Amino acid sequence: MTRPLPSYPSTRPGSAREAAGEPAPITPHHVAHRGGAENPSVAALRERFGAAIVRAHVMWGETTVIVAADAIHDVIAFLRDEPAHAYNYLVDVTAVEYRDAEQPMELVWHLRSLPWQRFLRLKVEIPKGEPLVAPSITDLYASADWLERECFDMFGVTFTGHPDLRRILMWDTYREGHPLRKDFPLRGRFSRSEQLTQALSIDTVGRYSMTELTIAEAFDDLPADMRERLAERRAAELARSMRTLDAGDDA
Amino acid sequence: MGLITTGERTIVRAPEPTGSTQDSWVTSRLDFLVNWARSSSMWPMPFGTACCAIEFMATAASRYDLARFGMERLSFSPRQADVLICAGRVPYKLAPVLRRIYQQMPQPKWVISMGACASSGGMFDNYAVVQGIDTIIPVDVYVPGCPPRPEALMYAILMLHKKVQTERLRDGARHTEIEPDPQSHLYIPPSRIDELSEPFGNSVHQTRSAP
Ligand code: SF4
């Protein structure tokens, strides 16, 4: 279950800034490539987490913080829950792999604070060859669900604690690996006819029409977990409509 | 009125003209009549997956006016469609969907492959995109272009009209469903598909596997 967002004074864009007497940001005319004012949240992070904040740099006016892998969940929870930071919008979860063998793989989180009008990029470095594992933040942001699934699908990052970590862009039975990894051949691993055979053997009804499936014949062919989810959803809908009926009777 | 088959032709013979009914009779070949009816109102099933679909919409809109060809009624159900217009690239994940939509269309049916992507994979010579929809379903007309201009699509439609007008009712090929191989789900040999999907143009310089 996703922890509810704390109730900040107001989430209207810039509201916290105004309350703190900070001037509204003006559109910058010239932004330096490197250097410039750091996002004020970084100082707070350093104070709170100490050595877990590996380094931070500013490029094109945007601050990037490199965080130790085991602290990332706490860091994001802190940034979200502290009213002095209030990062209430998760923009993206993704990863970067460099062609250079020495460069570590990077996992990236983009956070935005609407009340403070701040943007912060968090990164975790995972040296090449080490298992790609990171804690899931679906308990903090519900929107992390699909973002992490995409990151898993494309890069093979395992997010521990994710409720339903499966492929999202490629189909469930896709066997060629994780396409955005550098060792993935551009045209895929199999011959075109083999790729087509595999793609055409997908059961379209079983895969694509989630809502219609509750009535479709294909229901019994579904994976067990999907069947359960659909049954639960249906029971909840039924209960809700019964309640509405009852309320109508009382009135 | 009687149907007489003479050699290749099917002839509708009108009864001897008598008196006032003389004006109400026309004689023609049945083939011609049927083909004229079919080609004058082909309901398109738009399978728009990418930028080409925008150009398809422009073709259907008032300036280019597909209604002139009896095609203004876009059939969003394959069950009532005559011609499938595949406008845009088809990723492998969509391949079974396209195949299914084609199979759901009643015979006789035709396919226009609109744009470089639908016809050959276009610039997307990668792991995700089907290298030409003719590896999934039979195609009647290919329209080159990225995207093809509305004129090009209309030219393709007129070409399809010509094709339809030369069809024979006696020719059964138009009315038999192509059954894909149950094992591989392909309807043409795998070697032919690999040959069709060979890299060409700029994409031959791409390496198949990264160093
Ligand atoms: S052929 Fe060009 S316009 Fe058409 S789908 Fe491909 S990229 Fe888009």
Image: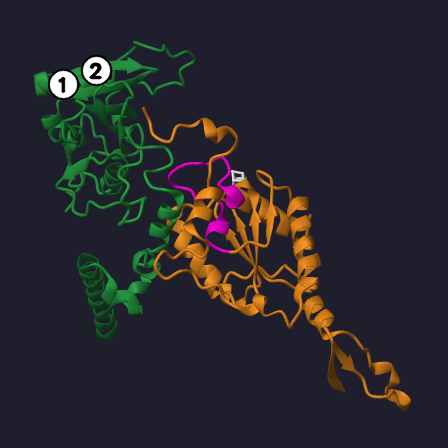
Chain colours: A green, B orange
* Tag 1: amino acid: Ile
Q: Using the image as rendered, state which of residue B195 and residue A220 is in the foreground.
A: B195
Using the image, determine if residue B205 lies above or below residue B49.
above
Where disc 2 sits, the SS reads strand
Mark 2 neighbour density, 10 Å: few (under 14) some (14–19) many (20 or more): some
With B149 as the anchor, is A119 left or right in this view? left
Q: Quadrant of the C terminus of chain A?
A: bottom left
Q: Which residue is mark 1?
A: A53
x, y percentage for residue B74? Answer: 57, 59
- Range drawn in magenta: B117-137
Residue A60 appears at what percent x and percent y? 35, 15
Judge if badges 2 and 1 mark residues of a common chain: yes
Q: Let me know if residue A111 appears in the view.
A: no
- Residue found 28% across the figure and 14% down from its top: A58
Give the residue type that dot 2 points to: Ala
Chain containing mark 2: A
- Residue A113 higher or lower than A248, as above or below: above
Q: Circle 2 sits on which residue?
A: A56
Mark 2 touches mark 1? (CB < 8 Å): yes
A59 inside magenta stretch: no
Residue nearer the viewer, A1 or B70: B70
Q: How far across and down, in percent of the image, does residue B115 sit?
A: 56, 43
Residue B188 seen in the current view: yes
Q: Residue furthest bottom?
A: B19
Between B77 and A92, the one nearer to me in the picture: B77
Which of the 4 image quarters holds residue A142? top left
Please identify the quarter of the rendering in which residue A41 is found: top left
Give the dominant element type of the magenta stretch: helix, strand or loop. Answer: loop
Q: Is B114 on the left-hand or right-hand side of B150?
A: left
Q: Is residue B127 above or below residue B35?
A: above
